Structure formats: structure tokens, C-alpha cells
Amino acid sequence: MARAIVTAGLTKCYDGRPVVDDLTLTVRRGEIYGFLGLNGAGKTTTIRMLLGMVRPTAGTARLLDTPVHPGAHDLWARVGYLVELPQVYPRLSVREDLEVVRRLRRVADPRAVERVIERLGLTPWSDQQAGTLSLGNRQRLGLARAMLHAPDLLLLDEPANGLDPAGVVEVRELLRELVHDHGVTVFMSSHVLGEIARLATRIGVIHRGRLVEDVDTGALERRRWLAVDARDRDAARAVLLGAGYAVDPTPAGPLILTDARAVACPEAVARLLVIADLPPRHLSVEQEDLERHFLHLVGEDRWAAP
Amino acid sequence: MNGFAAALWSEALKARRSRAPWASALGLALGPLVGGLFMLILKDPTWARRFGLITAKAQLMAGTADWPTYVALLAQMVAVGGTVVFGLVAVWIFGREYGDRTVTGLLALPTARVTIVAAKFVVVALWSAALAVLVAGLGLVVGAAIGLPGWSSGLVPHAVARLALTAALAIALIPPVALAASAGRGYLPPIGVMFLAIFLAQVVAALGWGAYFPWSVPALAAGVAGAGLRDLGPESYLLVALTGLAGIGGTAAWWCLADQV
């Protein structure tokens, strides 16, 4: 499958300290890649390197089969982006702001501005000065700038920032439509796990500058286990281990059985415990939850729900 | 529309929509008005005394009340005031992109960064030239309104040449301010650089080396402190030109090569 983004050993150091460290990832065309990380994890620096705004200390990046560098003007004609909060020229109207973008992006069709205004729901504010827009509408304007030229690749840094719940859903549906109907690739960074979980087809987790996870959301969803609890948890654990089940050691909370046979046949586990006079008081098949998984990866799972 | 035309259109729109052109015009327009007031005081001390104005101070600054003196005064205002106001225009055009973080939207486009920088410099230069024309035009109106003596047909080309040369020298010194605005990522560093340059220009000129310090040259060309064009050789103009070119090159290099964080 064609690749939209390829990085190899991408590294950025400031004062000798790596902010992004040996980042190697591939995003296939037509994917929605969710790039997750805590604040300061290196998400924005990565996006800036992908856009040629920051030179890597080491490593390379290619977008749409083109090496990234500031002068890759043909490449930038095919890439739309939103980096951090969209900053606006306060005294330009929304329409004028987008007209500036249209001209600088060399889009010949002047109707592109009206189309994107309509698409992002900015029509009521199209003649309003951008400096007076609400945070949510400013975000819409930022997204309109990114999408005006119908790019093949969208790099979006926190695209749901400032949007109200309806706006979040609207933008989510818009991105899905762009991917499914127009084959656009979306690389979006966020620390809003719910948004990534709903939208992304693939997820990368960056922590302290390093990519610690790169996984299909489908594979994540297929991660399931059986949670079992009994009054005498230690005895139950011993029985299950004796029966050949893999029981994850957990300091507190239910026993976690990750065997495929336990997930496929939880009643066998229940029967085993009942026969041992350790009837389960809790038995449930659970599926990986992005929030729990993310917090586990970044070592913040003391906050995760049990 | 090619890239440069698009960038020029964009920069002109941003400038037109802002309050900065009006603020800069108002700031520089004070020059001919205040100069006119001094001329009025010198011309009619009795009237000035009646209104409590001090003629002795006006005498110190302006000499006699006639057209040649007034033109020299206007040129000095363009040299000193222009260096400040033209610099502030550059600070606004370049520094606000960093200060307001709008620069991010200009960095990964089909239009080259160097083209955007070039368009910004053209807008700054045209804007500054328009301000110089405003000073000259307003000076003409004020001078005529207060009935200054000493007008002659030979004065016009002399006045135009003197004002145009002074303005051109002041405009040529804008690019280093743009570089300071870009590298300093905002408003304050270039303003600091600009005032430091003006301060040093005074000191160096007072020491007699002004012809070799670019920021002293516009004031010397305008006749500040009794100096004049005769004190300036080709090397002075060359220094100003090289300073401007270095500023343009440095600004373009900064936009194209530096990390834009």
C-alpha cells in the first residue's frame, strides 16, 4: 500500500536534550493516524519537522513520497496543516483570511473559499473579523485553511481544540468523509483519547520523545481478557494457575486471565472455581480501553480505572 | 497570479486592514506640523510671545524662518523620525507574524518563504516612501499656509532631492530591523535594536565618525548638526546599501533556514 508519511530515526535535540528521539513510523495512504502523547511529549515538534518548519537533528522524513524540506513547494501544495491553536490576522474577515490562503496556495478557483466556508459551517461569520471569533470558530477557520486546497494529506495538531461537542462530532464526520470519499490521509495529534479512539484507524503513542506504541486500532480492540474475582483471591489464583491459565499478577483488583481459551470460554473458569469452593463473585470479558492502555504505556496508570 | 503577486496582495491587504498605516502617518505628520509651528514662532515672535511660546528655543532649533530652513528641518525629521517610524512599520510587518504566531501559516506553502519575505520588504518600502511623500506634501501645505518667505523655483528640485535622498537612506536601513524582528520573534527585540542604533548614531556622529556608521548617514545627509552632503563620500552610501542588503539577506536566510518553533 502507498505510504503517506515515512520517518526514519527522526530526532530533534534542543541543548543536547532529545525532544523527539529516533522516531520511525509509517502512515499508509487513506489512514487516520492518531498521534497520542502527554503535553510536552514531542507531538508538535514532530509535526513541525514533518512540515519542514524545524530541521531534524538526525533522521529523515518523507511525505507523499517526497523528502521533506522547506523548499518542497510541490509537496506543500498537497498538504494541509493546522499546528497548535490557529492564530489569525485579527482585522481580516474570515472570507479575507481564506482568500489570502487561497492565493498563497495558488488555488485558481475563487469559489474554493465559499465552498470551504460552507463546509466548515462558517457562513454566519464569513464577514466577521477573525479576531472576534470564538475559540471554536477560530478552530474551524484553522481547519478551513488546512482543507481549502483539497489536500491529499492533512497534518492536524489537536484539531478538536476549543470545539463544542456538536463541533467535535461535525469535524469528526468531516474527516471521516474526507478519508472515505476522497482518499485523504489524516495524521492528527491529540491528548483527547476519546476523539482518537472514535476516529483513528491506527494509533501511535509518543512518550518523552519516543514512539512507544504503533498499532492498528482493530488490534487494540481485539485485546481482550477475562477479569475474575473471588472472596479468597489468592486461593482462586492458585487454582487457576494449577489449571494452566495465565494469570496476570495484579496488586489489587480482580485476577486478569489473558489466555484466549479463558476469553473464549469463561464458563469453564467459573465451573473450575465453583468446584474448588471458590465461587466467582465477578466474572467478565473485558476489552482493551485506549485510555487505560495509554496511561499504562506512559506510566501514569495509577490514575487508570480498575 | 504568480507567487510574488499573491504574496504582495496578501501583505498589502493585511497592512490596509490594520490601524498601523494611520498610526504611522499620524506619527510622522506631526513633524511638518511642529516644524511649521517653529517657523511661525520665528516668523512672528510677537504673536508667539502673546501665546506664551518661547522664541529663544525655536531659534536654537531652526535658525531663520524661510523655505530653505524649513526644508532642511523636514529632511531632518525624515532622517530621524523616519528611521524610527519606518522601523516600526518593519516591526509591525515582520514582528507581528512571530508575536501573534501567524508565521506558522506562511511556512509550508506552494509560495516560497523567500517570496513572502520579498513581498513584505516591498510593502514596507512602499509604505515608508508614502510616509516620506506625506511629510513632503504636508510640509508644502504648512509652509504655504504660514506664508514662509524664500520660495524660489530652484528650491523645488533641491528640496525634492534632499528629502528623497534622506528617505531612501532611511528606508535602506529598515532590513536589519526586520531581521531583528524575525530572529527576536516579536516586537520588543527589534525596537531595542532600532533605538540602540539611533543612540549609537548620535554618539558616533558626535565623535566625527558618522560618515562611516550607517545609521548616522541619513541624518548627516539631511544636514543635522550643520553637516551636509559634502561630508558624505561614496563609502557612506555604500555602507548604507551594504547594511540594507545584509539585512535583506539575513532576514531571508532566517525565514528559510532557521527552526521556526
Image (cartoon, coloured by chain):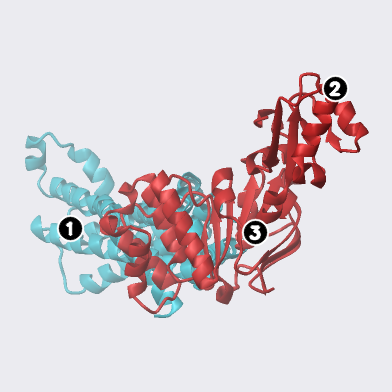
Assign a secondary structure to mark 2.
Answer: helix
Mark carried by residue A49: 3
Residue at x 15%, y 63% (from the top left corner):
B150
The chain letter for the residue carrying disc 2 is A
Q: Does residue A37 sit above or below B113 in this rendering? A: above
- What whole-number distance in Å separates the C-alpha atoms at marks 2 and 3? 51 Å
Q: Does residue B153 sit above or below A281 in this rendering? A: below
Question: Which residue is tagged 2?
Answer: A234
- The amino acid type found where label 1 is placed reads Asp
Q: Does residue B85 sit above or below A162 in this rendering? A: below
| Spot occupied by residue A60 in the image (x, y as percentages of width and height) | 73, 64
Badge 2: how crowded within 10 Å, few (<14), some, or many (20+)?
few
The chain letter for the residue carrying disc 1 is B
Assign a secondary structure to mark 3.
Answer: helix
Q: Which of A181 and A5 is in front in this view?
A: A181
| Spot occupied by residue A181 in the image (x, y as percentages of width and height) | 49, 71
Residue at x 16%, y 47% (from the top left corner):
B37
Question: Which residue is tagged 1?
Answer: B66
| Spot occupied by residue B168 in the image (x, y as percentages of width and height) | 38, 67
Question: Do we see residue B130 in this rendering?
Answer: yes
- The amino acid type found where label 3 is placed reads Met
- What whole-number distance in Å separates the C-alpha atoms at marks 2 and 1? 106 Å
* Chain corresponding to cyan in the figure: B
Q: Are marks 3 and 1 in contact (CB under 8 Å)?
A: no
- The amino acid type found where label 2 is placed reads Asp
* Chain corresponding to red in the figure: A
